[in-house]
Amino acid sequence: MPEVPEPPEPPETKPTQPAPPASLTVERVRRIAALCRLRLDESELERERVRLDAVLGYMAQLRDQTPGEADDADRDDLGALDLKNAPLAPDEPSPALDPGVVAKLAPDSVGPYIRVPRVLDGGGA
Amino acid sequence: MNADASSIARDVRTGARRARDVVAHALERAQRDLDAGPDGMHSVLEVFQARAMQASEAIDTRVARGEDPGPLAGVPVLVKDNICTAYGRTTCASRFLEQYESPFSASVVERLEAAGAVVIAKTNLDEFGMGSSGEHSAFGPTRHPTDPARVPGGSSSGSAAGVGAGVAPIALGSDTGGSVRQPAAFCGIVGFKPTYGRVSRWGLVAYASSLDQVGTLARTVRDAALTLSVIAGHDPRDSTCVNRPTEDFTRAIGQPIEGLTVGVPRLPNPEANHPDVLAALARTRATLESRGARTIDVELPAIERAVAAYYVIAPAEASSNLARYDGVRYGRRAALEPGAGLAELYIRSRTEGFGAEVRRRIMLGTHVLSTGYADAYYQTAMRTRRDIARQISAVFAHGCDALLMPTTPGPAFRLGEKTTDPLALLLEDIYTTPASLAGLPAISVPAGQTDDGLPIGVQLIAPAFEEARLAQLAHAVERWPEN
């Protein structure tokens, strides 16, 4: 056994993607919130912009320090996560929850049906 | 409750002690904490008085009939409130699920109860498991069991504080990036995260599915390993749960550790650690050597990037997992003005239902997955994840049986101390995220305390599915204040 185990030789550092914009704008935060189905008021937008920007700035070190190109191994070689040999659930029907139970969990229901606001004719979904 | 789970179960199985007395005592402690509310320790969100007493009496009846109720007979257990129980509520400490009653119990709860354990209460947490302090609960923060001005860590804040305060000898938590190990270190107890896939996630409310694992918290390594042995095992209802034979993870506890080799990675930024943490690490290393193990320095440069990768991958998965909370199928629905449509229902329900930290992580995850950003953030984080897994695997392949690291850079911090600096709380997870990203088993064990009496934990990490070896090494170094 060697005295000091050596880590694998790191490949040459080569960022493969163009850098994202240096900092977030309020408009970008507003857009993200909309994608998330969330609503922030004006003061929250600026506060979240500052916080998210700080976190994303820290994460930018990943791009600068992580070598190599993305390949299939990135998805399949995750230590104990043996995705190539992951067991798959049998493709067989299994008992589902009773519709009455599902309806009971819903905030609003009529009999076995979940009730939602109008979707068509101005529902705005 | 000072008795450990192993001795309670032994006494109940032999009839030397009644389960109802043990459970009644634990219920009294849990109820007192619940009644104190946010002004108290606030480790408990709901107590199951009648159900737990009934279950304990059924165990005594079985013992009287000559039956064996199981390896955790009569042991009171706390369950983190993001693990479903078919009784009471499962809130995830979120306004969104404040009234949610699960129609089923999680596999881990079924297994605990089948082994004779009695669930006495559900515990507080950072909402949906998102936090490292216990301050991000919609129902108010959990406080440290010995210093109410400090945090107990998170996100399994109530489970760790409850065990630390002696409400119950064991608890279930969930660990995505350190949420069992970090609060265990802060509260002076043991936190055991299994290999990814060792324990079923069926009934664990999803945060980041490729990282989430149910773990155990206890006052001793033996109890944590015993509880993990009970909840581990194949479950066809979770396709990521591996099909391996069940094991007794306590089997090697007490066996000599001579001949084992423990790698000690060079810390990325030693001066960023509390000096007492570094001292505890050195003391633990010396203990391992004095008991016959060999320790060697190792280099794992990729771990420096672990926390950044984690805070890309986990929010990315969270943004998808939490899309299900839309105010339609379960949980909170916002009250709408007449004529408001379905889109407004989604937006209002989610904005009102999620707390600030959850909203922030959903937005972060959505951003790093969006067009023009996914390669720079998400794909790079996945490459980092691979690098970490490969580097750790290489160290194990070269003959190391385990790694020794701090669990946290410092002891429990003050409430509010890290709520304004968005990076400060992230860096709490710097030592716990590597094992999470690599899917490896890891355990935090008490390693003494600071000069002002705050607990310190150290962490051991082992190759996949080597939980028994981890328990063996952890038992050899666990250090209690009275020692």
Image (spheres, grey):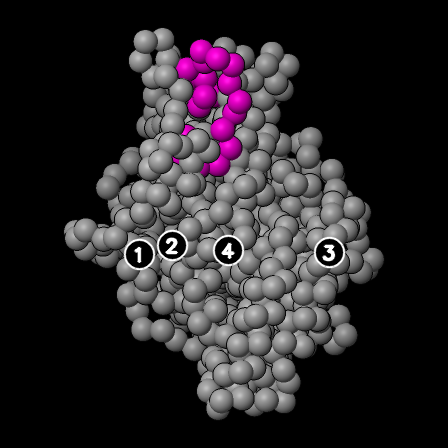
Q: Which residue is mark 4?
A: B87
- What's the amino acid at mark 2? Trp
Q: Secondary structure at mark 1?
A: loop
Circle on res. B202: 2
- The CA span between labels 3 and 2 is 29 Å
Name the chain under label 2: B
Q: Chain of mark 1?
A: B
The disc label shown at residue B33, or none: 3
Above or below residue B475? Residue B31 is: above
Residue B343 falls within the magenta-colored stretch: yes
Please name the residue shown 29% across and 35% down the image. A69
1 or 2: tag closer to the N-terminus: 2
Q: Is residue A22 positioned above or below B479 on the image?
A: above
The disc, 3 or 1, on the residue closer to the chain's N-terminal end is 3
- Name the element at disc 3: helix
Q: Is residue B139 visible?
A: yes
User: Which label sits in the foreground, 4 or 3?
Assistant: 4
Q: Which residues are magenta?
A: B328-347
Of the pair B429 and B364, the residue shown nearer to us = B364
| x then y, percent, for residue B452 | 83, 57
